[in-house]
Image: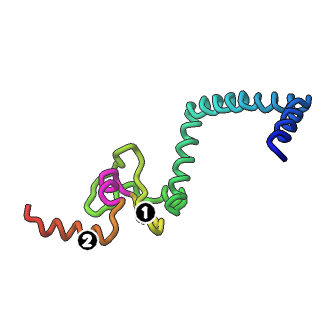
C-alpha cells in the first residue's frame, strides 16, 4: 500500500460513524483513569491505605532479597553487624535487608550506618580495607 492509498484508507476509516463513538469512548477512558487515580490517592491517604501501602512495599523488598514477610517478621529487629548496639534502623526508617548483590542471597538486617559502609563491598574489598587500616598507623 502506498502512502497515498494509506492516507485515503485512514480518512475513510476515521469517517465511519462507529469509529467516532469508539474514539469518544477512548477519550472518556482518560477521564475514568484520572478519576480512578484520584480515588486511589485519596484511599492511600487514609490510615488503612497507608498500612496497605507499607505492607506491599515490605513484600516487594522481601521478595527482592529472597525471603518471606513471615521470615522477616521473625528476625530480631537489630543490626546484624558485630558489636553494633543499634536498636533503631535510622536513616529513612526501616531496617536494611543486606544481601549479596551477585547471588541475591539474604545476609541479615543492618542499621543505616552499617548498610552504607558494607552494602557494596565484596569479601576481597573488605579484606583490603582491614589490611589497609592495620597498615596505617593513626
Q: Is mark 2 on a helix, strand or loop?
A: helix
Residue segment shown in magenta: 110-119
Q: In the shown orientation, is residue 44 left or right of residue 121?
A: right
Residue 118 position within the rendered picture, expressed as x and y whole percent measured from the top left? 32, 60
Q: How far apart are marks 2 and 1 (CA)?
A: 18 Å
Q: What element carries label 1?
A: strand
Viewer-side label of 2, 1 = 2
From the image, which quarter does the C terminus lie in? Answer: bottom left
Where is 24 relative to 135, above or below?
Answer: above
**Residue sitting nearer the eye, 122 or 73:** 122
Could you say which disc has been placed on residue 127 in the image?
2
Q: In the shown orientation, is residue 97 left or right of residue 31?
A: left
The residue sitting at the right extreme is 17
Could you say which disc has been placed on residue 132 in the image?
none
Q: Residues within 10 Å of mark 2 (few under 14, many from 20)?
A: few
The residue sitting at the left extreme is 137
| Location of mark 1 (residue) | 99
Q: How crowded is mark 1: few (under 14 residues within 10 Å), some or many (20 or more)?
A: some
Taking the spot 53% from the left edge, 47% from the top edge, the residue there is: 57
Taking the spot 72% from the left edge, 27% from the top edge, the residue there is: 31
Amino acid at each position: 500500500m502506498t502512502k497515498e492509498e494509506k492516507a485515503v484508507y485512514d480518512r475513510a476509516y476515521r469517517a465511519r460513524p462507529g469509529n467516532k463513538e469508539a474514539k469518544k469512548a477512548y477519550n472518556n477512558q482518560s477521564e475514568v483513569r484520572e478519576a480512578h487515580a484520584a480515588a486511589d490517592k485519596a484511599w492511600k491517604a487514609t490510615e488503612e491505605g497507608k498500612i496497605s501501602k507499607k505492607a506491599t512495599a515490605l513484600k516487594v523488598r522481601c521478595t527482592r532479597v529472597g525471603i518471606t514477610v513471615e521470615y522477616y517478621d521473625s528476625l530480631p529487629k537489630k543490626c546484624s553487624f558485630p558489636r553494633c548496639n543499634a536498636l533503631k534502623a535510622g536513616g529513612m526508617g526501616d531496617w536494611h535487608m543486606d544481601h549479596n548483590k551477585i547471588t541475591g542471597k539474604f545476609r541479615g538486617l543492618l542499621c543505616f550506618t552499617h548498610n552504607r559502609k558494607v552494602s557494596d563491598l565484596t569479601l576481597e574489598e573488605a579484606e583490603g580495607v582491614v589490611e589497609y587500616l592495620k597498615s596505617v598507623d593513626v
